[in-house]
Amino acid sequence: MLTCRDNTQLQNRTANRIFYLPFTRLPFTIPAMRRAIYPGSFDPVTNGHLDIIERTCKLFDEIIIGILVNPEKQPFFSIEERHDMLTQVLQEINRGSCEVRVDSFQGLLVNYAVAQQAHAIVRGIRAISDYEYELQMALMNRRLEPSIETVFMMSAESYTYVSSRLVKEVFQLGGVLDGLVPPLIEKRMREKMNNR
Ligand code: PNS
């Protein structure tokens, strides 16, 4: 801890910056901003994704929702549609002081994470079946870029079986999506189907 009481002093350290309140002369520390990338296809975003984002907000100052642009896949929604829907439904969640923004990326996730100066990649794990794939990805990403950590968030019990793939299947077969996706997403899925 620095002892100097000069009000104008502003010290830069590797991770933290120390400021001095002009009226109390007591130093206080502003930790470096922690930024995470939450990558995925989000085709469409589900309540499971939103639950992960909401809880991740407690750990980071900023989360970038990175939608993967994958030219090899035929998505239900375009990147622009997914971007728009995510932006809208994110208004409804409890973010606290965390800043959440939506973006898209192509190519290696770790390259994107470095370009965004992120500290971590966040992934949700629903069941043991997710674990093997996620472990492989996390280890490969660490090999490619050791400075980026992968943080795993366990899904809420109520969403352990919810995936974008199943949501689309249930929807296309006429099933009810109540509680699986926000109402706006179900509405947009219906509109998309009607316009096909
Ligand atoms: O929602 P998804 O489809 O499970 O997300 C998968 C995603 C986007 C996280 C993964 O496919 C990815 O990171 N793709 C980017 C390409 C890449 O970096 N591949 C190497 C990962 S080890």
Image: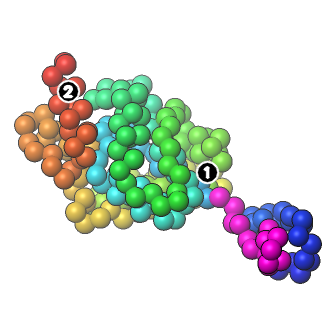
Q: Is residue 153 left or right of residue 119?
A: left
- Location of residue 35 in the rendering, given as x and y in whole percent from the top left corner: 59, 54
Q: What colour scheme governs how the chains and residues are painted in the rendered image of this protein?
A: rainbow
Dot 2 falls on a residue whose secondary structure is helix
Instruction: Give the labeled residue for mark 1.
Output: 118
| Residue 134 figure quarter | bottom left
Q: Residue furthest left?
A: 174
Q: Position of residue 43 (x, y in %)?
A: 32, 37
Please report contact status of discs 1 and 2: CB closer than 8 Å, yes or no: no
Residue 86: image location, x then y, percent: 38, 40
Q: For the residues marked 1 and 2, what is the alpha-carbon distance in whole angstroms?
A: 36 Å
Q: Earlier in the sequence, mark 1 or mark 2?
A: 1
Front tag of 1 and 2? 2
Q: What amino acid type is highlighted by mark number 1?
A: Ala
Query: Mark 1 packing: few (<14 Cα in 10 Å), some, or many (20+)?
Result: many
Closer to the camera, 91 or 115? 91
Q: Quadrant of the N terminus?
A: bottom right
Left or right of 61 in this view: 180: left
Q: Is residue 56 above or below residue 41?
A: below
Q: Is residue 130 left or right of residue 112?
A: left
10 Å crowding of disc 2: few (<14), some (14-19), many (20+): few
Q: Can residue 35 be seen at all in this image of the molecule?
A: yes
Where does the magenta region start and end? 18-33
Can residue 147 be found in the magenta stretch? no
- For disc 2, the marked residue is 191
25 is within the stretch colored magenta: yes
Instruction: Please name the amino acid that badge 2 sits on.
Output: Glu
Where residue 92 sits: x, y (%)? 35, 50
> Can residue 151 be seen in this snapshot?
no
